């Protein structure tokens, strides 16, 4: 049986990152934050999508990734504001996802209306 590395590798890398963040937070919260926000999944997605894709398809995919990163940034901002307000981690995450969902919805609506 052959291993489908394009499917398995992202999972392995994600597990390694989670373990690294858990270990690094004991030494430096800054280094743990850097590890948590490293662009790991995006290059893996590029690699997976590039298999059998044309140059035009890759250009469209990278454009979509660029546009869709903004709701994630909103998630981080909302979670940071919630942390500053003294909210617990569960409330921070829920608020972050609400901000992410609302901004994603607005982005999708804008993309549909503007054709981007």
Image (cartoon, rainbow, N blue to C red):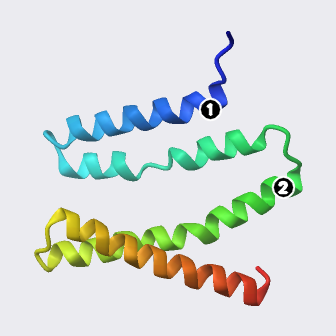
Q: Residues within 10 Å of mark 1 (few under 14, many from 20)?
A: few
Q: Which residue is mark 1?
A: 7
Q: Quadrant of residue 89?
A: bottom left
Looking at the figure, which quarter contains the N terminus? top right
Q: Give the answer, above or below, for where 23 lies relative to 73.
A: above
Q: Is residue 18 left or right of residue 74?
A: left
Residue displayed at 35% across by 49% down: 36
Q: CA distance from mark 2 to mark 1?
A: 20 Å
- Give percent across and percent down for residue 86: 10, 75
> Which element carries disc 2, helix, strand or loop?
helix
Q: Return the disc, 2 or 1, that comes first in the chain's sequence.
A: 1
Looking at the figure, which quarter contains the C terminus? bottom right
Q: Is residue 82 left or right of residue 97?
A: left
Residue displayed at 47% across by 29% down: 12
> Which element carries disc 1, helix, strand or loop?
helix
Q: Assess whether mark 1 and mark 2 are in contact (beta carbons under 8 angstroms).
A: no
Q: Nearer the viewer, mark 2 or mark 1?
A: 1
Q: Give the answer, above or below, for where 56 lies relative to 75.
A: above
Residue lying farthest to the left in this orientation: 86
Q: Residues within 10 Å of mark 2 (few under 14, many from 20)?
A: few
Residue displayed at 26% across by 72% down: 80
What is the count of numbered marks? Answer: 2
Q: Quadrant of residue 74?
A: bottom left
Q: Which residue is mark 2?
A: 57
Q: Give the answer, above or below, for where 93 lies relative to 104.
A: above
- Give percent across and percent down for residue 103: 50, 80
Q: Give the answer, above or below, for where 88 lies relative to 15.
A: below
Residue lying farthest to the bottom in this orientation: 113
Indicate which disc residue 40 carries. Answer: none
Residue displayed at 34% across by 50% down: 34
């Amino acid at each position: 049986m052959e291993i489908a590395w394009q499917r398995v590798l992202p999972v392995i890398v994600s597990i390694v990152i989670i373990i690294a963040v858990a270990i690094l937070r004991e030494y430096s919260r800054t280094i743990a934050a850097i590890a948590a926000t490293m662009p790991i999944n995006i290059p893996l997605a590029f690699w997976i999508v590039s298999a059998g894709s044309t140059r035009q398809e890759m250009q469209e995919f990278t454009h979509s990734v660029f546009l869709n990163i903004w709701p994630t940034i909103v998630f981080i901002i909302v979670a940071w504001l919630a942390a500053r307000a003294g909210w617990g981690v569960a409330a921070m995450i829920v608020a972050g996802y609400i901000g992410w969902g609302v901004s994603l919805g607005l982005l999708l609506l804008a993309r549909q209306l503007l054709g981007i």
